Structure formats: C-alpha cells, structure tokens
Image (cartoon, grey):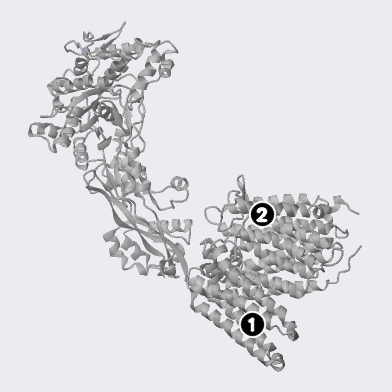
C-alpha cells in the first residue's frame, strides 16, 4: 500500500535551502579567510595576555610588634622564545652578567617548555640591578620583566621557626586543586607552611592586550574584567625576637636546641635549633646555592632539633616519674629509699653518686638520686598491677597526658612525638610475658627506650608550672579575622595527675636549683625550678640537658635546653636556660653572671669535641646523671 | 525478504562512510584543540581526546548492536520512548543542578548526561509515528496541532531548563512539517517563530520595534492606494492610529522605566483598533497583520523575558554586541577571537597541530562550542570548505535516503534527522563566523562531549537500520 505523495517536489525546496545556507557559509569563510585579511592581521598583531598579579605575602611581627618578616620587590626576567628576534646577544649577556652558554641553554629550555608561553629566563634580579638594565630592555623583544616579591628578615634569626618560601613543585600544584600554578610561591617549612593560607592572600589577574612586539597596548576592557589581588594577612607571632636572638647567641658554636614557652598560654617565646642559619640565605637568586651548602653541612643546620631531635630525657624525667607515682599512690611524699651508691639488683647496679640518703620525694629530686627513682618505678609497676605490661601501659597513659610519647600539637610542621616504650617492644626483646619491672628499671630515670624532643621537655615543664595542664605550644598570636584559629590554640589539656601533687615536686625542682645539682641556674631574687639531665650518647660525649621554669609562683617562662655532646646537664644546658630566663624576666643579665654569659657565647663545641673547654663548675663534678654501670648490663 | 544476516550488506555505504569520516575528523580536532607539549601522546584515555575516543567507541558498539533490532521495534516503541524522554526531561528539570547557566544535565553516579540530546531522536520518532499513522497527509487543524504539539512539548520543557540552544534545534522540524503537507505560510509562521526567538536575542527591544513599525508602514503603503480610493475617512483614521502607536513606542524609548508597560499597551491598543477598522474588502492582508501582532507580542514578551530571565547576562551581552548594540567591549570578545582565529588560518591553514592561537587557548570553549575555529585555523579555507562540503553531503544523503523509502515513517524520521543536523551545523558554524548570535550548541560529531556523540550516533544508526528495510512499509 503506497500513499500518494503529493508533496514530493518540496524536497527540492528543502535541499535548496540547506545547500544555500551552506553555500552562504562557504562564501563567508572565503571572505574571512582568503579575501579579507583584517582578521588575520588582527590575530597577528594582537593577543590578550592574562597576567597574574601576585599579592603581597603577609608580614610577620613578634609579640612586641617588631617587624620580623617582610617583602621586597624582585624581578624575574621572562622570555617568550617565539618573540625573540635577532639581537646583540653579547651585549645582552654582558648587561645581565651571564655568559652565552647560559643564554643558549636557558633559551633552549624555554623553547622546550613552550615557544609561545613565557618562562623564567633569569630569576630574581634585585631592584637596583634591574633598574640599571630596564632602560635597554626595549632593544630585546621577547624579554620582559615580572615583578615578584622576596622575603626579607631584618633579624637574621628564628630561621627554623619562620620557615622558608619557595616556588611550588608539581606535587604542590596537584594537591592545591588548581590554586597554584607553576612559578607561584608557597611556604615550604615552619610557620610559612603552617599558615600558608593566611599569609598567601589571593592571586589576582589582569587581562592585557599585547602587540606582536610584545608591547603592552593597555588593558582589556579598561580593566573591568580584571580580578584584584588580595594581600595576605599580617600575622603577629608569639615569639619575642630579642629573646630569640639572645638564645641563639648563647647557642653559637653548639649543637642543640632551646625552647621557651609562656606556661599559662602555651605561647612559644623562643625556639632555637642550633646550628642555625640566616633565613636571608634562602631567598633571592642565591637560594639554590645556599640551600645546597646547608644540606651538605655536617651540622645539619636545616634540621629543626627543637621539634624533631630525639634524645633520652635522662634525669629531667624524675620530676614526672614522681608526679605519676604520687597520683597512683605507690609513692607518698615522705617516702625514703636507701641509696648506697646505686640501685642493686641480682648482679647489676644502677649507679648513683655520693649524697645524703634521700628521706623524701623532695630530696630524691634535689639530689637526683638514681636509686630513689628506680624504687619509684619498681613500686609504680609492681604494686597495683597484675603484671609488668599492665603497669607499663598505665605509665604510658599518664605520660601521654603530659604530651610525652605523643606530639604536643604545636602549630609548626614536622613535629615528632618521641617514644615511650610499649609492652610489645619488650616482648620483642625478652619474649612475651618474660620480662618484669627490673628489665626496664632505668625508665624511671628517663633512660632505657624513652625518647623526648626538647619541645616536649619544655612543654612538660610548662605543665608542671601550671600545676596540671598545658595548652598546646603555638607560635600564632594574632591575625585580622582569624579568631577561630586562636580559639583552637587555647584549649587546656589536663593531665591525669591532680593539682595537689604538684607542690611537692615543685619544691623538689626548686631545691635542685637552690641546693642541688643545678646551682649554677640561680638567679638573684627569682625562685627558679628546674632539673638537669644528661642523655647518654653512644656516639660520643653525653648530651647536656636542663629544663625548668621561673618564677616558682606565677611562672612566666618554661625553658628546655639541650646541648649535644657537651657533657653534664649542669655544665652547659643549665646556665643557658637560666640566662634565657633571666633575660626574659629582667630584660638584662646581672653583672655577677656576666662571666657565665661570656663563657656560653664564646665556647665552640662543634667539630672539635676533644678540645679543652672551660673548667666545669664545682657542683658538676659529681654529676649524678652519669651511671656507674652501663645500663645495657642490666639486660640479660 | 528480511535477511538479518545480510544487514551489513544492506546498509547504505555512502552514509556509513560519511558518518565514520566525521567521527574521525571530530577525534582529530578534539586532539588538536587539547594538544600541548606535555601531553602529546595520542592514546591517552585520561586526556580529553582519549575520553572522546572512548565515547566514540561506545557509540559504535551500541550503534552496530542496534542494527540487530527489527525495524518494527522503532515504530512500536516510538511512543513509549517519547513518553520516557519527556518524563526524563521533567525529572532533569526538577533535580538538575545548574551547569553553565542551564539545568539540563542529569547526574547518574559518576556519569553526567543531557537528556535533551536524546530527546531529539525521541521527538523525531514520535513525529514520524504520528504523521505516518494518518491515512493521508496532514490535513485537519486538529492533526496539525497534534503534530506541532509533539514538537513543542519537549521544546517547552527544554526552554524551562534554560537550555536555549537545544530548544532552538526543534524549530528545524518545521522543515519536516513543510515536507509533510503543512501550508507554506504555516511553516513560515513557525520559522518566524524561531526567527523571532533568535531575533529577540539578537536585537534590543527598541530596534525590534522600529523594524516592525517599518514593516507595518510598508504594508500600509502597499495597501493605501486601494483603501484611499474606497474609504478615505477610514484610511486617515488608520494612519492616525498607526502614528499614535509609533509615538507610544517613542515615548517608551525615551522613558525607559515605562518602556515595557507602554509597549505592551501600545500593542494591545493597536490590535483592538485594527480589528475595529478591518475593512472587509481587504481581508487578504489580515493574516499578515495577525502574524505581525503575534510576532510583536511574542518578541516583546519573548525578548525581555529571554534577556532578563533565560539568558545569563553574559550571553545576552554577547548577543547584543553582535549587532554593535552593547558598549561592553568584552562581550564580543568570543566572536572577535573566534573570527581572528579562523581568519588567521588563511587559504591553506597553519597545518595540523600547528594552530598557535588554538594552543594559546585564544578562544573560550574551544573544544565544545567553538571547535570549528580549530579547523579554520589549522586547515584554512581548504579545510573549512571541505568540512562543510562533507557535512552538506551527509545531510543531503539523509534526505536522499528519505525520498527513496516506501514507508512514510522512515521518510519523516530521516527528514527530522536531516533537519536537526542542519540546524545544529547552521547555528554552531554561523556563530563562530559571526553570522549568528552566540548560542552554545555542539557541532555534531566534532564538539567534545559524550552525550552528544552518543545521541547523534544513535540517530544515524536508526536511519541506517530503517533504510536497510526501505522496501517495507513500517507502521
Ligand atoms: Zn642516690
């Protein structure tokens, strides 16, 4: 059945219409592409370039409003290879202070990246140098400057804490979900990294019309399409740059760290890792070279020892051991233990030194009696627990509440949490169920497998100073509109030890300085509390340590000091810590202690550990922190 | 007579070759657009062209497997298919989030697709089903309204999705109605409807009114001689009222706040007056005036509605600059950049993958709406000429197939497909060469986009399948 198709002829109208339109388009294209050259010429002459406007990175101020980090302009010389014309290469190279080999290599590299897109030809030319060459720039088409800023540090201090800024790498770009583009800067370490989003601001864009000679013809649409850049926020830090500077001067020529915290706020007052470096080295054109030198340096100046240095706390730990045992009830304040030169077990001795028999906790701490705290640990583990692993777990729990064995939560990247041994660790060494408190008795005196960072030591002292709580140490103090950040940084972490037990321990720490092992740390008219420690170092001389706080009532500062390979805690660490306290609390060092200041500043302990050093003060002669017997002898 | 094992042999080879050729051109072009130094490998499925290749592969597999269907399948299921698509469009309207100013994308798990792309096929099948079911050509008013309704229903929903480009595609089906017996003036009205649509995007309200007033003036002048001789007072009254309406337009022009209100009033006034004045002897011109009134009303509402509600401001700005009506130099940015890019290709082009402006991403949306620029720049006039020639051959081939069918169903379907391809190419290419306003709509098989390639491929494979049974009468 076929329907009569009366409209069959209409197909030709339709086909004609379609063909007609196509023909019209072809004619239009002929005009556009072949006959009329206007658009082609336009394309040749004009391109729109999207220029990124980099915001100023936020500046940084110390707690007293002193400017510690700001920006200065610097120029990157950019090149678009396809626009480079014949030119006087020699003159160009002379002007820039580069050789022709660099010129050829850089140009080839840029061409490989893209003949049409700009790449950096010569990075980071400083202002005056750039002004000198700017007026001749027009002779060299294809080259143009890009203004950037560079970090500068009026005080050449606090490099580890502040961190540094570098160009983003491919993984930064990938992670940022499209925010960063090649050539952007990003905070790579320290505070610059933690607060990148506060400091960086917001990039802006300008749409510029550029002619074939790469001359700017003005902005597109009178700049209406442009997006303004937003400057990064200025930030106030908690550190006291003068104190930081002072502490760094004391650590000159020594490896180690100093951490000073304001106990009631958790604010970091100073954070030194030594050897330090001048943060200005990692900016500008010589950054790469300097970075290489720093990486190769045997002193590892780029390591932040304050946050990542792993050291046994040694005797400093005794105060904490006393606290947890008091809380647990396995120790009472007037408990005495015998010490006949050490703690004796079947076959081994944990050595001690000559001192009066400690008849209570205060004396145990004051004289830093090893035997006393071996007893304390033994009773803590054995008295209330079914077995040693249970006791160790309990101890671990207590310590975690003091920020020991776990990160303190400082707002700087890369913090390490130290180590408090697990039952599993001893299972591995002795076999499951085949060890008891005597196998790890030296844990009670901060040895065995306990590892603590200087920051944790300082935080521990801040906690004792606060009688039972700490606020995570932090460096951020204030930035406009960032109150929420601040709130997160003011949370009190309470320990598992009640406030009542702190008095007796504080008395002990006070006695350490008044009439104990750290008399060198005394400051006129200020009651200092603290504890020395000497960390055994299998690779050389012991690490000298001291941590404490002052004044005893209403403490203003808690300090931890560690000096690597330098001997007893009282020799280097205690004087340095007390000088830092004195400087912070009094603003200067009293004349009577000037000799101490000079000795600390002028002693170089790096590289020549065998060289004779200044005579040690008398009270250090019988440092109790040195064990008569090697602890390893305890192990079967 | 039906020999399923011979289906490949019975396919129209020229059509198949043209289709595959276009897929190839599309893939090469998408590769060229996204070509850069970092990703120069061709076989890389994570890149844009790699994803496009995957979609093309899926389309081919699906297309060839569709060839195993019985032709009756398409006639039988055209009604359910249409209903499902309409429901899908409604669902999309309800749930879709806005992407690029339109709410037309449906998210299913990780995949996104645009039901509007498939609605074209469904509408074509439905139209074919309805008209072929009539015992004779479309005759009665009722039949015409149903045929028009089949087209207008999906179109209306797509307009509500604010996807103006896709909606506009449906106006091309008026060509099919014309072929199937609609009166020329009915088709012209339909086309003017579409033109009014475009015009309302193109032209500011004032300009449109002046143009229309000019048309009225011409008609008046044309009919004046006879009216003057027959009925002088009525003739004068007519002129008076005409001038009055022009004056009210002018008032609206100078008092922008009152503009829309006055314009609407003026139109209503004119309509009433014209009915009262209508001289019986000159009935012949009344359809033209009805048309005029309908068009004016539509464009008045349409244009302000379209400008204010449907088009995002950047889109209407682009439209306005096309006519030099906007003083925002940025709005004609796309078109200028596009023309510059095409123009820079010259006669023979810069060479495949050598398009500097393409690589500079000189034109926005270059892998989708403005993909024709890349062909223009890299292959020059030779490229664009042969590209359009292939496309023309492809469309004319479909019409050729349409005319050799015994079954009206297949004929109507083929015409629908040809019309849809035609208008897609016309709007897309017309936009890039500055002959039509900027309306975002893909160039079939060339523009990047999975839904688009798949939907157009299905459309073509149904043509191939139905044509293989051209000696049958399908109902
Ligand atoms: Zn003792």
- For mark 2, give the secondary structure: helix
- Residue A167 located left or right of residue A579: right
Residue B271 position in % (x across, y down): 65, 77
Q: Residues within 10 Å of mark 1 (few under 14, many from 20)?
A: few
Q: Residues within 10 Å of mark 2 (few under 14, many from 20)?
A: many
* Screen quadrant of the N terminus of chain B: bottom right
- Residue A3 located left or right of residue A178: right
Q: Residue at x 77, y 65 (%)?
A: B415
Give me the chain letter of mark 1.
B
Residue A132 position in % (x across, y down): 28, 64
In the foreground, A504 or A50? A504
* Screen quadrant of the C terminus of chain B: bottom right
Disc tally is 2
In the foreground, A283 or B418? B418
- Residue A388 located left or right of residue A5: left
Is mark 2 in CB contact (under 8 Å) with mark 1?
no
Residue B259 position in % (x across, y down): 52, 74
Visible residue check, residue A411: no
- For mark 1, give the secondary structure: helix
Ligand 1 near label 2 (Cβ, under 8 Å)?
no
Dot 2 and dot 1 within a common chain: yes
In the foreground, B72 or A313? B72
Q: Is residue B54 above or below residue B246?
A: above
Q: Residue at x 74, y 72 (%)?
A: B187
Q: Quadrant of ligand 1?
A: top left
Q: Residue furthest top?
A: A346
Q: Residue at x 41, y 13 (%)?
A: A430
Badge number at residue B215: 1
Give me the chain letter of mark 2.
B
Disc 2: which residue: B89
Residue A379 sits in quarter: top left
Q: Earlier in the sequence, mark 2 or mark 1?
A: 2
């Amino acid at each position: 059945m076929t329907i009569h198709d009366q409209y069959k002829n209409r197909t030709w109208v339709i086909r004609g219409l379609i063909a007609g339109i196509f023909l019209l388009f072809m004619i239009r294209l002929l005009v556009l592409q072949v006959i009329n050259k206007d658009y082609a010429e336009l394309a040749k002459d004009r391109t729109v370039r999207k220029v990124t406007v980099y915001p100023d990175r936020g500046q940084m101020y110390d707690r007293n409003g002193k400017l510690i980090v700001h920006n200065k302009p610097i120029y990157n010389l950019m090149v678009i290879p396809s626009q480079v014309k014949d030119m006087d290469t020699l003159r160009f190279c002379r002007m820039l202070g580069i050789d022709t080999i660099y010129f050829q290599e850089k140009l080839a590299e840029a061409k490989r990246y893209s003949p049409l897109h700009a790449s950096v030809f010569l990075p980071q030319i400083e202002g005056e140098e750039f002004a000198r060459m700017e007026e001749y720039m027009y002779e060299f088409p294809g080259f143009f400057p890009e203004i950037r800023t560079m970090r500068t540090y009026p005080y050449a201090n606090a490099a580890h804490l502040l961190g540094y800024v570098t160009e983003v790498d491919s993984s930064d770009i990938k992670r940022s979900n499209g925010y960063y583009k090649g050539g952007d800067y990003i905070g790579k370490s320290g505070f610059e990294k933690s607060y990148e989003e506060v400091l960086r601001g917001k990039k802006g864009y300008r749409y510029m019309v550029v002619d074939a000679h790469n001359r700017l013809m003005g902005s597109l649409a009178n700049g209406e399409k442009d997006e303004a850049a937003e400057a990064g926020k200025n930030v106030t830090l908690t550190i006291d740059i003068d104190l930081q500077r002072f502490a760094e001067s004391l650590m000159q020529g020594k490896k180690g760290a100093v951490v000073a915290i304001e106990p009631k706020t958790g604010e970091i007052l100073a954070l030194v890792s030594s050897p330090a470096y001048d943060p200005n080295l990692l900016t500008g054109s010589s950054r790469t070279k300097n970075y290489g030198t720093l990486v190769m340096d045997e002193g590892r100046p780029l390591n932040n020892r304050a946050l990542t240095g792993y050291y046994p706390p040694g005797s400093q730990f005794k105060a904490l051991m006393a606290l947890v045992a008091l809380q647990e009830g396995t120790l009472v304040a007037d408990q005495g233990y015998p010490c006949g030169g050490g703690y004796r077990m079947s076959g081994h001795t944990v050595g001690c030194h000559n001192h009066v028999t400690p008849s209570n906790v205060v004396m145990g701490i004051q004289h830093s009696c090893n035997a006393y705290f071996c007893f304390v640990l033994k009773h803590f583990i054995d008295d209330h627990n079914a077995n040693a692993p249970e006791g160790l777990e309990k101890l671990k729990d207590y310590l975690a509440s003091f920020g020991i064995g776990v990160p303190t939560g400082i707002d700087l990247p890369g913090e390490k949490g130290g180590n408090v041994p697990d039952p599993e660790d001893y299972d591995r060494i002795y076999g499951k169920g085949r060890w008891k408190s005597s196998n790890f008795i030296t844990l009670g005196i901060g040895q065995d497998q306990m590892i603590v960072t200087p920051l944790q030591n300082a935080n521990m002292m801040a906690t004792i100073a606060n009688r039972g709580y700490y606020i995570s140490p932090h460096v951020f103090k204030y930035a406009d509109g960032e109150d929420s950040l601040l709130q997160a940084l003011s949370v009190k972490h309470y320990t598992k030890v009640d406030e009542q037990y702190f008095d007796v321990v504080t008395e002990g720490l006070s006695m350490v300085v008044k009439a104990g092992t750290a008399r060198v740390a005394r400051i006129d008219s200020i009651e200092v509390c603290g504890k020395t420690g000497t960390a055994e170092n299998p690779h050389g001389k012991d690490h000298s340590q001291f941590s404490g706080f002052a004044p005893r009532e209403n403490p203003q500062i808690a300090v931890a000091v560690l000096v690597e390979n330098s001997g007893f805690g009282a020799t280097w660490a205690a004087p340095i810590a007390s000088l830092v306290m004195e400087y912070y609390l009094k603003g200067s060092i009293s004349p009577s202690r000037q000799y101490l200041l000079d000795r600390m500043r002028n002693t170089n302990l790096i590289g020549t550990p065998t060289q004779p050093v200044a005579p040690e003060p008398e009270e250090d002669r019988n440092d109790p922190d040195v064990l008569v017997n090697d602890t390893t002898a305890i192990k079967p | 007579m039906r020999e399923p094992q011979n289906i490949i042999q019975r396919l129209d080879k020229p059509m198949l070759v043209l289709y595959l050729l276009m897929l190839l051109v599309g893939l090469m072009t998408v590769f060229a657009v996204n070509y850069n130094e970092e990703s120069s490998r061709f076989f890389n499925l994570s890149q844009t062209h790699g994803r496009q290749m995957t979609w093309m592969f899926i389309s081919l597999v699906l297309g060839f497997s569709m060839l195993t269907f019985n032709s009756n399948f398409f006639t039988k299921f055209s009604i359910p298919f249409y209903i499902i698509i309409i429901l899908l469009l409604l669902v999309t309207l309800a749930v879709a989030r806005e992407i690029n100013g339109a709410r037309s994308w449906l998210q299913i798990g990780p995949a996104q697709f645009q039901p509007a792309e498939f609605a074209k096929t469904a509408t074509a099948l439905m139209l074919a089903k309805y008209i072929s079911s009539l015992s004779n050509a479309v005759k009665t008013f009722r039949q015409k309204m149903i045929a028009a309704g089949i087209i207008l229903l999906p179109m209306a929903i797509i307009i509500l999705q604010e996807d103006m480009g896709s909606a506009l595609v449906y106006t091309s089906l008026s060509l099919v109605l014309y072929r199937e017996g609609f009166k020329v003036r009915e088709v012209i009205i339909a086309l003017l409807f579409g033109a009014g649509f475009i015009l309302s995007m193109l032209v500011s309200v004032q300009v449109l009114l002046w143009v229309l007033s000019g048309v009225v003036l011409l008609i008046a002048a044309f009919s004046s001689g006879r009216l003057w001789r027959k009925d002088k007072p009525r003739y004068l009254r007519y002129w008076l009222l005409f001038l009055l309406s022009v004056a009210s337009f002018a008032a609206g022009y100078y008092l922008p706040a009152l503009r829309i209100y006055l314009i609407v009033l003026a139109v209503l006034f004119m309509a009433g007056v014209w009915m009262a004045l209508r001289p019986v002897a000159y009935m012949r011109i009344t359809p033209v005036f009805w048309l005029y009134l309908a068009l004016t009303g539509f464009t008045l509402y349409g244009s302000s509605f379209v400008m204010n509600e449907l088009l995002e401001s950047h889109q209407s700005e682009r439209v306005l600059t096309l006519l030099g009506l906007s003083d925002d130099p940025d709005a004609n940015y796309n078109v200028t950049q596009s023309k510059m890019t095409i123009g820079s290709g010259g006669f023979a082009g810069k060479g495949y993958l050598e398009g500097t402006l393409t690589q500079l991403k000189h034109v926005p949306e270059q892998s989708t709406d403005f993909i024709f620029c890349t062909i223009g720049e890299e292959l020059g006039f030779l490229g664009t000429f042969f590209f359009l020639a292939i496309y023309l051959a492809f469309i004319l081939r479909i019409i050729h197939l349409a005319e050799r069918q015994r079954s009206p169903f297949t004929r109507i379907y083929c015409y629908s497909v040809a019309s849809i391809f035609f208008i897609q190419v016309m709007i897309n290419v017309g936009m890039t060469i500055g002959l039509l306003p900027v309306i975002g709509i893909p160039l079939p098989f060339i523009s990047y986009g999975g839904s688009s390639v798949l939907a157009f491929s299905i459309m073509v494979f149904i043509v191939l399948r139905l044509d293989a049974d051209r000696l049958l009468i399908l109902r």
